[in-house]
Amino acid sequence: MNYVTAGATGVQVSPLCFGTMSFGSEADEQASAEMFHRVRDAGINFFDTADVYGQGAAEEILGELIADCRDDVVIASKVFYPTGADVNARGLSRRHIVRAIEASLTRLNTDRIDFYFVHAFDEHTPIEQTLRALDHVQRQGKIVYPAVSNWAAWQIATALGISAHAGLAKFELIEPMYSLVKRQAEVEILPLAEAENLGVITYSPLGGGLLTGKYSSGSRPAAGRLVDNARYAARYGQDSDYATADRFTTFAKEIGVRPPTLAVAWAMAHPAVTAPIIGARNLDQLQDSLAALEVEMTGELREQISGLSAAPAPATDRTETRQPNWT
């Protein structure tokens, strides 16, 4: 395993991060343990979870699994989404953060979380209050680095400015959505990460399953995340998404690589990406994503794959100045 540095932290992590969203929901404790031990055997030391995954069960299961190797793994968790019925059991207020970190530490059975993500943007809480709360729990040793997921580039940049001005702990790792069918991060988020030397772990490299080869414009399974989950069905519901999936699946077959493997390898090869997050419900699903470690993703191959989907519009209207950022 060739480990990589997470941004400016000096922390060495595997080039794939294992996501535990399925733990305690789609994967029971036995299946979760099997996947955990498989990725550890492959050399993965980076694990992503959240307080809301499995209504807390994902953190609990992961906490049991890391009990005898805590110092050998890097753990990321998150705060924002509702964790109870109370109106204040959510968001990024100082009140919720200081309560949520204690609950996550208990479930994970650890004294600190390496990367603590704000899971989404809170329109009701000033950014500075959130940053001061993260700085506070960092000073207490309960988190090692603040991190951010699902914020726009301007929101992240604003937060970095506030942290620099006020001398607060700053975001060191960001987690955007990124796949061949969701490339908006290429416009501003990934360039921001490169400019500010931020680590990047990206989620949904398989496009919610769209890039696995199971879906096409003319054939869709009777069950699956894009069928059963309304949020995912809406996120990947455009005809153009399925057209991209058709082209991608055909291309993967032509070069003899499983579509899920190629999709993860493509995301992993972006120069700003530290590690895509891979997830699965069972060992069979996991194998294809792990195989991305063996793919030789040349610049030419990545450009060919990128050409299978429409590149997002640049941040300005000067389209004539757009250049691929992976050459």
Image (cartoon, grey):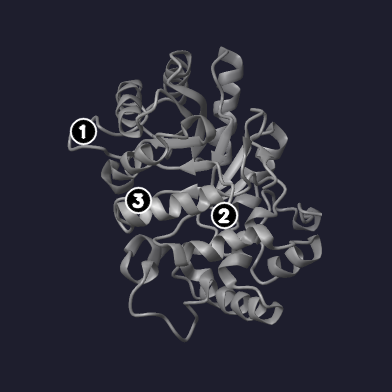
Spatial distance from mark 3 to mark 1, Cα to Cα? 26 Å
Q: Which mark is residue 178?
A: 2
Label 2: which secondary element: loop
How many marks the image carries: the answer is 3
Q: Which residue is mark 3?
A: 23
The image quarter in which residue 263 lies: bottom right
Outermost residue, left direction?
85
Residue 325, position as x, y percentages in the image: 76, 52
Q: Quadrant of the C terminus?
A: bottom right
- Image height of 239 relative to 179, above or below: below
The image quarter in which residue 257 lies: bottom right
- Image height of 194 relative to 103, above or below: below
Residue type, label 2 = Tyr
Q: Earlier in the sequence, mark 3 or mark 1?
A: 3
Q: Earlier in the sequence, mark 3 or mark 2?
A: 3
- Image height of 297 relative to 246, above or below: above
Label 3: which secondary element: loop
- Residue appearing at x 31%, y 33% in the figure: 107
Spatial distance from mark 3 to mark 2, Cα to Cα? 22 Å
Label 1: which secondary element: loop
Which one is nearer the viewer's eye here, 293 or 216? 293
Q: Earlier in the sequence, mark 2 or mark 1?
A: 1
The image quarter in which residue 102 lies: top left
Spatial distance from mark 2 to mark 1, Cα to Cα? 32 Å
- Residue appearing at x 60%, y 66% in the figure: 261
Please state which of the two labelled residues, at mark 3 or mark 1, is closer to the viewer.
3
Residue type, label 1 = Val
Residue 140, position as x, y percentages in the image: 43, 14
Q: Which residue is mark 1?
A: 87
Please state which of the two labelled residues, at mark 3 or mark 2, is closer to the viewer.
3
